[in-house]
Image (tube, rainbow, N blue to C red):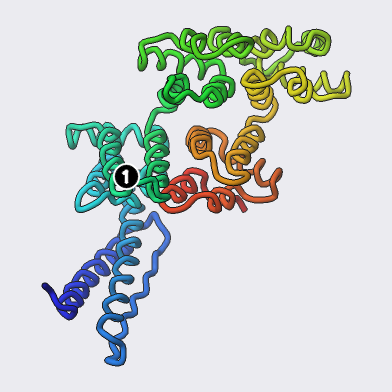
Amino acid sequence: MENIMERMKKMENVMAILSNALDEMHTQSVHTKAVKVTCIVPTSEARSKEERLEKMENVMATLRNALDKMHTQSIHTNGAPNPKQDAIHLNSAFKGTGLNLGKVISILANRDTTQRRLIQQEYRLLYSEELNDRLSQELDWNLSWNLGGNINAILKKNVKSAILLWMLDPVERDATIVGKALTLTTLNLDAATEVICSRTPSQVRLFKEAYFKKYGTQLDSDISSRTKGNHKKLLVACVNVARDEETEVDPKMVEEDAKKLFKDGEKTFVRIFSERSWAHLAAVASSYHRTYGNSLEKAVKKETSGHFKHALLTLLGCAMNPAEYFAKVLYKAMEGFGTTDSTLIRVVVTRAEIDMMHIKEEYSKKYKKSLQDAIHSETSGDYRTFLLSLVGPVEP
């Protein structure tokens, strides 16, 4: 067995190599800010060998982290990520005694949909396997080290779910979320309702096609077998009716719809909410409040309940201000004791490339706290790092 002095000598050699590599990458990189690492290893004989060894181990960890960061940030060509180099570095993260999850996150969390797709293509060409399959295997292996229901295992399960969901194309991602939500063993009607009612008609049409391709069944058929009553009628209508996406509205029709909703209430909710454009529905809500002195949202809450109410409020919220709606969803997922991680993951991943900047603004304005601070206080480890990377920095 090696004695302490032999181990220290080897560490000094590794540190020198790491330091040289870091300096070289720092010199070559014109894309990133400087990363400064100060290595101070006491040499006084007054300090014990064990203390020196511990100090050197900490310095090595710092150097490795800095090197990984510089390495990831320097694999750009003309300011743009290089998908082939990304694929190579991801494969290197799978080597060795364990998954280098920090490197995986630092690459994938900073690539958009097109870039991630190109990385997957390059990985397939280089290694004759699907990147998502390899990721799933590595994350499963990473998870297997912490079985037993402890908090670390939960965190690793969450980061696995988030990363694999992020790697899907947005259309396939929506189809996957809804498919899982409509499966009896993982039934989650809130998730299915949120996705179906918060997407534009063109988005619904695309993920409806992807759903059939992935599961071999029609989306409206699966909805009908898992839901009931007005909730079923509304969701089926949302995936089948060719709802208008125009931003112009007919003032006369707006007033007529507001009057029908006030007079007939729940009887007209399904038809108007599923057939009218978001611009029209927002105008109806404004007309309703102006004419009757009460918000359409309060009327929905008073006259409906359960999943049907959730579907109506989702449609109304996304018609009026989708960023504010999702800020509320995120707040509810994190308020009180515990966090609804499935909701947190779903919303952060699906909105990161759509309107996350606006969601952050609405969250801060409504709850007097940044979304980043909220996520930071409710999560930890690689799970926290990944979500915060998707959410992005606090806006000045």
Q: Position of residue 126 (x, y in %)?
A: 18, 37
Relative side of 167 to 360, left or right:
left
Residue in the image at 53% along x and 22% along y: 189
Q: Where is residue 221 in the image (x, y as percent from the top left)?
A: 47, 7
Residue reaching furthest bottom?
46
Residue under label 1:
143
Residue in the image at 29% along x and 38% along y: 135
Relative side of 93 to 69, left or right:
left
Quadrant housing residue 319: top right
Relative side of 300 to 91, left or right:
right
Q: Position of residue 54 (x, y in %)?
A: 30, 75
Instruction: Say whether residue 216 is visible.
Output: yes
Instruction: Say whether residue 110 is visible.
Output: no
Residue reaching furthest front?
148
- Vertical comparison of 359 with 8: above or below: above
Q: Residues within 10 Å of mark 1 (few under 14, many from 20)?
A: some
What residue type is disc 1 on?
Answer: Leu
Residue in the image at 38% along x and 41% along y: 157
Quadrant housing residue 171: top left
- Vertical comparison of 140 with 266: above or below: below
Label 1 sits on a secondary structure element that is helix
Residue in the image at 71% along x and 12% along y: 269
Residue reaching furthest left?
1
Q: Position of residue 150 (x, y in %)?
A: 40, 49
State which quarter of the image contains the N terminus.
bottom left
Looking at this view, is 319 or 228 the one in front? 228
Quadrant housing residue 270: top right
- Vertical comparison of 193 with 321: above or below: above
